[in-house]
Amino acid sequence: MNVNPRRLVSPLPPLSSKGPASAPMMPDSTLLERDRPASDKPMVRLRLIGQMEAWTLTAESILPTGRKTRALLAILALSAPRPVLRGKLAEMLWSRRPEEQARASLRQEIHRLLDALGPVGNHILAIHRDHLTLRPGTVWVDVEEVLRATPGKPAALCLLDGDLLEDLDGIDPAFDNWLAAERERLRDRARVLAEQLLREQLDPELAIPAAQQLLAIDRAHEGAWRALMRAYATRGERGMALQAYERCRAVLADLLDAHPSEETQRLAAEIRASVAGMRGQIAQQGRPDPRQPLRISGAIPSPERLAEPPTPPSETRPTVAPQANSGPRHGLRLGVLPMQANGAGLAEQDFAGTLAEEITAALARCRLLSLVPSASLARTASPSRDEVAIGRSFGLDYLLDGTLQRSGERLRVSLRLLDLRAGTEIVWAERFDRETPDLFGLQDEIAAAVAARMEPAIIGIEAERALIRPISEKSALDLVRRATAALLRPDRAQFDHAQHLLDQAMVLEPELSAAHSWAALRHLCSIAQGWAADPDAAGAEAIRLGERAVMLDPQDARALTIAGHARATQQHRLQEAMVLHERALTLNPNLALAWGFSAVAQAYAGHHDEAWRRAEQAHALAPLDPLGFLADASRATVALLRHEHDSAIRIGRELGQVQPGWAEGCRAMLAALGHAGPPSEMAQTRARLLAIVPESSVLAIIERHPFQRDEDRAHFAAGLRRAGLPD
């Protein structure tokens, strides 16, 4: 199943959000549980779809750390309220061991499970001599909600945003067989319901989310792809309809090595005939309004064709033919091979496998990437580790591989990222040398660093690839990638060009969240640089685009933190900004941009120590991030407010060497120099700031910064005045 960004969560926090901002998000069950008896009060929420999670009602994670322990809990949850015999559990989890050893291992796992469940363990888990069971009504399980869904109450289908227990593959052959059957049972039930819901939708506004929901369950469902194409075409959004066809073509090639059926190809030909003049109309209209979809005249599929129900699965089998894996995808497909640990002991070999799983889990939080389970790659990879063959088997764009070596108490992990579309070219590499007293901590550290550093590297690679593609062949995503390349360097001409590209992307695909979030960031940067002709109007547009991006994809951490930064800097609503930043970090704790922007909000609110911790985390996660100048500017500002002027000056100097044209870092450095810097450097920095923003003044700068404490505002202003900046 594909990731469905529209989960049962509010896309933006309410203005009066209360409670700890960092509390983990859980599915909103108000729509799912309101018809239950009052006596049914679950004590634990258990998520089995996607990566396994377990929370108490006070938002305390009680997920066991061991994979076998998690598997034991999952078996009991999916079997409830029926008890599961101990012998059956032992056979499912230790099928290769003698019965007595398997039962002994089961007893140990039961103790571990009780320890993990903590104070609620004895309340939800009933342990008997010959069987185990979860007590009825004590655990909310997402799978139960999906299986309980009906056409009248289909809300639980939104919980299907991944495969069942996708992080528990490879535990034991018997468990894998059981898990495959459970996945098929869940998928079949959800597919039947989603097909029925799609057949009932005659309005294209309702047919689009219904088709997307069915495709989240079955990516190769051609009936759903056709319904999506018809709905977009009926709304006049031909570019979206043709992109849906290209995605359909790519999915069928990836999953089934097949072409779309003749019916699907005919529908695409009809839509393509009506969109032939699209680019000419864009040129005639001049710069388009990104808030409105482009409407093209000409014949479109009729509403009657839109209302045509999807063909049943038995009739949607495509024509199988050899075909290269081509065509655009929503996310770049990446796999992580288990590290090679030749000659190492069992502990290192286990570490190599679990490290690959942890890196996969960390990278899965990046909206840019679509991850293949590491366990699946491990089962397919031969001893020769043929990267080309592995990439072809799984339709990969990138493959992460590496080696593990031990020398005494030190462990060296060397990683390399291969671009499989460029002949296995190594496009990124990193080496970690660490002492090894805590292997679990080392896994977390490496996985976080890889996720934080690899994403910006891939963004740069894809931006370069988009630059060389002919403009006539560029998709909306290509335009966004090309605009991203322009935004990596603060240059006014490049920023204006980036806006033009993003406007076109939003016309071609109005529901592309990334186009809106990058456009919002572009407006914020232009305001900071003093390039916006009307800063207030640009600020309002940044807020609108940021909120639109979050509405389109509430699970996009980058969109959330950009929307939060817009609220903080343009509306001075710091509490709302901090809620958005925390939500972004919950979704992707390895996103350096979110750490940097949240540091700014904390600093403006007067929480200087917390702001410094976050700013340092942003720098540590991705020291070479092309967008790192945004986070480094926040580090300089935080150091200034902490009265650590030497640190602020040092950070400003480092930033000036990388991005001398970035005004925000220059302002913080100038204020710090006013308090403690040499006059010569003070004059040089003042001249550099005035060259970037000639109208810079103390009052203009202070009014744009939402300081909550008068002493912070006064300290910043005093430094600027002492540095010679006019009032």
Image (tube, grey):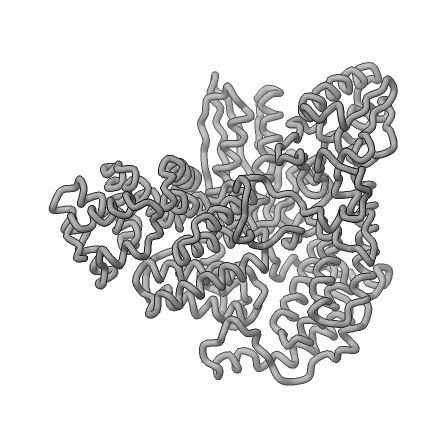
Q: Is residue 141 visible?
A: yes
Name which residue lies at 26% across and 51% down.
667
Compared with 168, 434 (above or below) is above
Give the residue at x 61% y 49%.
370
Can see residue 397?
no
Nearer to the camera, 304 or 101: 304
In which quarter of the view is residue 97 placed? Answer: top right
Instruction: Examine the image and state in which quarter residue 163 appears.
Output: top right
Indicate left or right for 483 with 246 as reference.
left
Q: Position of residue 501 (x, y in %)?
A: 46, 68
Q: Position of residue 420 (x, y in %)?
A: 56, 49
From this viewpoint, which residue is outermost toward the left? 679
Q: Residue at 61% of width from left, 58% of height from top?
A: 329
Front one among 542 and 119: 119
Left or right side of 397 for 577: left
Q: Quadrant of the C terminus?
A: bottom left
Q: Position of residue 385 (x, y in %)?
A: 62, 38
Above or below residue 440? Residue 188 is below
Quadrant of res 308: bottom right
Residue 511 place in picture, x, y as percent: 59, 64
Seen in the image, is 650 located left or right of residue 550?
left
Of 395 and 463, the residue lying toward us: 463
Task: In the rendered view, tell whether residue 172 sits above or below residue 650.
Answer: above
Number of numbered discs overlaid on the protein picture? 0
Relative to 125, 476 lies left or right: left
